[in-house]
Image: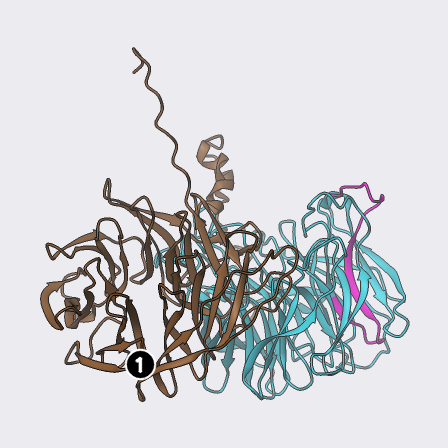
Chain colours: A brown, B cyan
Amino acid sequence: MLLDLKGRTWPVEPTRNPEFDLTSSHLQNFEKYHHRSFVQEGAMVAMPLAFPGITTPIPADECATIALAVDASRMVFGGTAGRAAHLFAAMTRGVTGIVHDLGVIPGATACTAVMPAPDRAIYLATSGPDGGKIWRHPAVGWPYDCLQEWGFSRPGYTAVAHPFADEGIAHAVLDGEHRTIWGVSARTGTLFGCAIDGGEVTKVRKVDAVQRFSRTLVRDLQGRIWGTACNGSLWRFNPADGTFADLGLWIPCAAGREIHNQAESFALDPDTGTIYGSASADGFLFALDPATEQVRSLGKPGASPTVRCMTVGHDGRLFGICGDDDDIGHLFVYDPEDATLRDLGVPISLLGLRGYGYVYRAAATGADGELFFGQAERMSHFWVYFPPVPRRRAMVRGGDA
Amino acid sequence: MPGDPSFYEFTDVPTSDSCWSLSAGPDGCIYAAACSEHLGGVSVYVARYDDEHDRLDYILELATAVNDPPDSGRATQCKIHYCFCPSRHDGILYAATHLSGPALGDFLYSPWADWSDPRKAFRGSALIAYDTKTDEVRWWDTIAPREGSRCMALDEERGRIYIVTYPRDHFVIYDIPTRTRRDLGRIGSVNSQIVFTDRRGRAYTSSDMGQLVRYDPDRDRLEEIPTYIPCEPYQSRWHSVFYDAVASPEGDCIYAVTWRAHEHLFRYWPEDGPYGRMEDLGPATPERDRSLPIDTFTDHTGGLVFGADGMLYYVASRWEGGPDVRPTPQDCTGVIYRMDPRTLARDDMAPLAREKFPAQYVSRGGRDRFGNLFFGHVGGRPSGIFRMPMDVPGGRSDLHEPLRTWG
């Protein structure tokens, strides 16, 4: 049947509404509206997972970056997930500006932890069809001038241990003091240790009876390992004496939603020792003081209940990106100085590569205070965020207000 | 010889500002989308050219059909953007909606800003199956929650629909028999404006860097292949994405144009080698001041359609002057060009003209059952379509074949 639209009343164009003051600043500033959605402070730069213009990038569907770590030489290592898992080395210092794909990790579909060691070897935790493994990659040397001439190699990976044949490794951290990697398995939540010399594996215990546990760990300044179990209750493992404690401390969420709650990401303030975390049920941030065992809710950085990557900047501020796989992520910052939490906007890269960034799962802080973020989409890039340099305080002259 | 093109205004939808989608239906009639993307609270309407009475009929208000009324408070189902796909065997015309129109009373809509707001965010692109035999919507489904469908293709043999979403630029497969969707992930930031299929059922679109992205249904893989869309030597490949593409009558070759200023025409032979073969046919629009980042509303080519005479027709903006000129839309004329695929010789057939508005921007072209050509126009209020009568043999009413099955 044909529509009869002839008698229909149509809406009035708001910008032509005679009842509006069409000279108002609200109308004059429309052009800013769109831009305000995107990162408002500092600058984000996305680097391809390649030597730009020289090599093909890590293929789509293999490049979702889920782990990042910075070594003592300022090299940034990333672990990916997808059809295959790669380790890459991102170099942003000297005459580099490249990402070197160190190759596919045999049999792995997710590189869940990247752990640079003091000797510059890189240890990896992986998951794949044949379970969870620990790998070692030799130190990656800095190349010669990447504007002139260069040469790279892929020395490959050495298997250190195969702790789990039937489940992956959710996360792991390196304990340099005991030359041990502490990790948690992905399905059963088995806390384990793996000696990096020899690969001996010790299974400590399951961190929760009903497999409701955090797939992320954090190591505090005293070397203790933290995570959450059922209802988002914090546990702590002390490698020095082998004690495991269920602390009965719950991370924040909306009332009654504890059964859905786990820590989703952690970030350690290396100066104060504060552990920041995000809670999966509703997206609340929290601060944990490991010394006093106090947990403080910091509020929600955005509408999404998901915060999967955070890192503490040199100035003590916490930066992170909220949003899950189906979201448009937002960069946020928490300032412990004045307890403010601000949404900085949707990640966007305008310098060099031009593109939006939507989904992220890893973060790390660089030596100069630049922040690295691992994008986790079908096609992903290595993102660097340069926070703004704060203005100095305006000088107050005598007599001036 | 073809007759002069004439304009058919969407008079009954006075708020319409664009026709982003135009296609022959499975019945050989021309369907066009009367879109209102700049005014809040208005649905897209589907119009059909009535060749018996030489007029446009309005057959569908999408927002009502998909139960997302234009006064819902959310961003509206305001347009169909390169998302008409006719299905031969059952007479269905598939269409998917797109976003950009604000909520009733709102000034603007930003999918980035309002992504997480259930009161304001676009509900999602609605895929509808419109039965052209009975003039009824048979069914509808949400094909892209919170996102719009920028472009769409139908694989009739496999019963699949492919879309590219906006703003996140994801490639999505919709399985018609099971009414299920599968998101294969992100391609880039700049939407390609088309998905097309080859004779083997492989679907193609492009990345931000002009690289072809191919979905192979036999391998169930979406992958970037080492084939690139041509551009000017002074430009980088960034933003060399597909704008419009049409298959040759034989189906062995795709003629296409880019969505960027100083766009190139090219043809792609998808079955020539493992990654196909790209053939650059050169710029489609005149020279101008290359130092000015001119907009794609001025420097534009679209409406690619093969005539029943086997010639390729398309509309490109044309302006006078040389390498120093900086044209605006008002300086431009939309010109229908004809290209002989055998010799690649081009000649201009006819200018498009509208009262008060420039007519340089044509979105899509289509050929009806009698072989006449139609072009969707973007701009002016109300917007509308052009019809160019063609000098074709009388007595035939199947000249819309072979049907283009992508938007």
Is B208 inside the magenta-drawn segment?
A: no
Q: Position of residue B247 (x, y in %)?
A: 74, 76
Residue under pointer 1: A199
| Position of residue B146 in the picture relative to residue A336 (left or right) | right
Is B315 inside the magenta-drawn segment?
A: yes
Residue A8 visible in this rendered orientation of the protein? no
The magenta-colored residue range is B304-327
Graded by Cα atoms within 10 Å as few (under 14), some (14 to 19) or many (20 or more), the crowding at tag 1 reads: some
Q: As displayed, is residue A191 above or below residue B336?
A: below
Q: Position of residue A139 (x, y in %)?
A: 45, 67
Query: Residue B89 is drawn in which quadrant?
Result: bottom right
Residue at 71% from the left image edge and 49% from the top image edge: B298
Which sits in the foreground, A167 or A204? A204
Query: Residue B260 is drawn in which quadrant?
Result: bottom right
| Position of residue B53 in the picture relative to residue A116 (left or right) | right
Q: As displayed, is residue A78 above or below residue A345?
A: below
Amino acid type of the residue tagged 1 in the rendering: Gly
Secondary structure under the numbered disc 1 in the rendered image: loop
Q: Position of residue B56 (x, y in %)?
A: 66, 64
Residue at 50% from the left image edge and 54% from the top image edge: A92
Which sits in the foreground, B279 or B336? B279
Query: Which image quadrant: the N terminus of chain B?
Result: bottom right
| Position of residue A81 in the picture relative to residue B305 (left or right) | left
Residue at 23% from the left image edge and 78% from the top image edge: A192
Most extreme residue toward the top, as rendered?
A: A399
Residue at 75% from the left image edge and 54% from the top image edge: B262
